[in-house]
Image: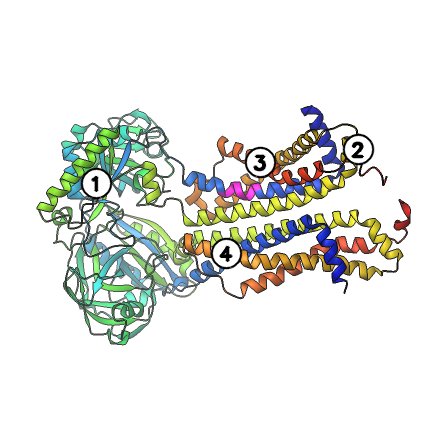
Amino acid sequence: MELGPIWRALLRNKTGAILIALQIAVTMAIMVNAISIMQERSSMMARPSGIDEQNTFILSSDGFAADFNERVTVEEDLAALRAMPGVVNAIQSNSIPLSGGGWSMGLQTEPGAEIDGTGVAVYFVDEHGLETFGLNLVAGENFSATDIAWRGRSETSWPDKTIITRAMAAALYPDDPGSALGKTVYINDDEPLVITGIIEQMQAPWNGWDGVERVMLTPNYTLFGGADYIIRTEPGRRDELMPQVEALLAERNRDRIVRSMRSMEEIRERSYRGDSSMIKILAFTIILLIAVTSLGIVGLASFSVNRRTKQIGTRRALGASKVAVLRYFMTENFIISLIGVVIGAALTIGLNIVMIEAFSLTRIAWYLVPAAMLMLLVVGQLAVLGPAKRAASVPPAVATRTV
Amino acid sequence: MFSYYLKLGWLSIRRNPLLSALMVAAIAVGIGACMTIITVNYVMSSNPIPHKSEQLFYVQLDSWDPNNQGDDGFEPPDQMTYIDAMALMKAGKAYRQVASNRSSLVLEPQNEDERPFSVDARNTWSDFFPMFDLPFIYGSGWDDTADRSLERVVVLSKEINERVFGGENPVGRNVRLNGMDFQVVGVIDDFLPVPKFYDVTNGAFNEPEEIYIPFNVAVEYDLPRNGNTNCWKPFDEGIEAFLNSECAWIQFWAELRNETEKREYMAFLNAYAEQQKQLGRFPRPLNNQLSDVMEWMEKEEVVEDDAQVMLGLSLLFLVVCLLNTIGLLLAKFMGKSGDISLRRALGATRANLFTQHMIESGMIGLGGGVLGLGLTWLGLRGIEMLFGDFVENLVGLDWVMVLTAIGLAILSALLAGLYPTWRACRVVPASQLKIH
């Protein structure tokens, strides 16, 4: 290989090479950090909400008339919903995973106002809650119909039973999460609750919360003036049932309005819209960036080929083969790109440290750095291929022309 | 001379159309990416009420839990309790003051055929309208007697008036909200502060509410509240107990016209907190805060982290595009060594050549800027498509942004041109003539 001459030729014309190397380095820093953010977001979006998303939808019912009888309405609505063909089960609740709006409380293992409770998302359910949400009870038992109490809007006391998620059990009893069943925990500083069941997994309504899997189910019907109905259908029948359910509820009682009907699919899409958009924007940025950098390489290489036409002709006249000329330009680009990706690796890690500090992003996965280096080397070689081929086709006779 | 250089620049650009197009495209793409993100950041961090943002103060009283630090240490809660908000309203120590919160009501149209629908409502006080400069089409806000005597009055947004009264003057007529009649006193024109500074707790980029009713009426009839509510201390059953609880759910703003008023108000707040301490409330050390509009936006981190990450990445993107342009310009100018040395030999000074090449770079920048502006517009439409209604108010281009885009493009091109031009000027007169 003619590394020596190539290197010395590069040194005689440093600036162009340095510019390309820097461009490759910055490209790599942006690319790797962007990919890392994309990975972080998509793994966040891949977390299961714990419920049967495909076949579930939700709608709100708000009473407004002065003589609105909420209790009777809820009882009749639920009976009608559960009797509908195609409906697996339905409940009244205050929220649903990923919806962004909900209720949180603190639970503590010892009573006392001075103790800092563990935050937990609350879903009010009846004995049909587990089936409607599609939750997997791993220990203890479901609520029974007699457990369910009616809760008024400004009521503050809590039913004495609760079902919590495994994640909540682990947060309350970090040393022995398995022991949570049957234990007494305290809400509102000193109000005791017994943990009567543990469910495998369920998400809180807020996807960005660091305790997103800390959930408690409370055996309550609510009388808050308005509530959500959560309806789970047989597989594949959701879309057909949604308008039917809306019409049924709207017709059954005109003292309330039925609104905000949306499927879990829509709720998930909306909940992660920021993240999925971020992924798309970053992907687009990376493509543009690589395009700009490759075009830059093509432009500069073409220029350098044009400038060196005479030298190429001379080399060819002196016996260098076409392949040798091609190899010269490919090797030159390889050296420049190699310097670029090495600087790039350092820049990438530097940028990542800055991003972790400023925006608490995650660290990049180690394999991204070598993968990006390899990829940019290949991109560089592909970009220079065209100009290098043109260089190789310079006829030896050019050498004799201008002098 | 300038027009001569413009002509030379144009000729030079036309001589290598491909290289020139590449440079213009590189700058355009860099500017497009950058300006798209800069625009979103600019709107997110813009001043929603510039003429008086320094006289409007968000009031935070630290009535919170001594045992619970929260995420950022002992910061006062970002909303206020009912007891405190009412005490401050009653004292009336500021030039204007407003306690408000968000709610959702059901509006029953008079036409029996139309179904009732839900509207976003703000429970507020008479000072809200003059304080935040709401523009009225019909009528006006209510006055403070309405606040005190629980008059059921309502101010409608333009859209609701359109929907319920067909856009006619509804002042004096009634609308039925949650089963009660409210008399319309005014209709506001388009009012779209971005960010929605007076209630960032419930979403800094939400749409403004559709109707406004007196706060006291909402409390008296226990109308639904649906904004963020935070409590740290258990309380008893019933609405009375809730109102007297340590739950924070109210946003409180004070208008203070100068430093003296601000100082006096702060002293008043501290005296109030001290007095509450006597009564056994406010268990934490004294930490009341007044933040003007922009300070409050900063504190509540209204500009999303994502937007800032994108801003950083897009600036780096611009750097790549500039490195690209520097390389290409260098190639181009060095390719003109023959011309340059000829001109030098014929008497052009280095200063002449410097000006000439900087003008050429500037022209490329201008081209990149104009094209980049088009790309910015496309980029903003793309963002709008991706994020949907959430960003509706964030993706407009105003004159400031248009000029920034062009300016940034020209500046970038000049910066990129600096080194290649310097190299070009160093060409020795007549040095390149020999070989031809």
The chain letter for the residue carrying disc 4 is: A
Pair 2/4: label in front: 2
The earlier-in-sequence mark between 3 and 1 is 1
Mark 2: secondary structure: helix
Question: Is B432 situated left or right of A265 in this image?
Answer: right
Q: What stretch is highlighted in magenta?
A: B31-37
What residue is shown with label 1? Answer: B179
Looking at the picture, do discs 2 and 4 lie on one chain?
A: no
**Few, some or many C-alpha atoms within 10 Å of disc 3 (few <14, some 14-19, many ≥20)?**
some
Front residue of B103 and A178? A178
Relative depth, front residue between A2 and B301: A2
Under tag 3, what secondary structure? helix
Q: Name the residue under label 2.
A: B342
Q: Which colour scheme is used?
A: rainbow
Q: Mark 4 points at which residue?
A: A350
- Quarter of image, res B423: top right
What percent of the width, then of the height, locates residue A383?
Answer: 70, 55
**Disc number at residue B411?**
3
Kind of residue indicated by mark 1: Gly
Q: Do labels 1 and 4 share a chain?
A: no
Residue at image position (80%, 39%) is B432
Is residue B114 among what the camera can see? no
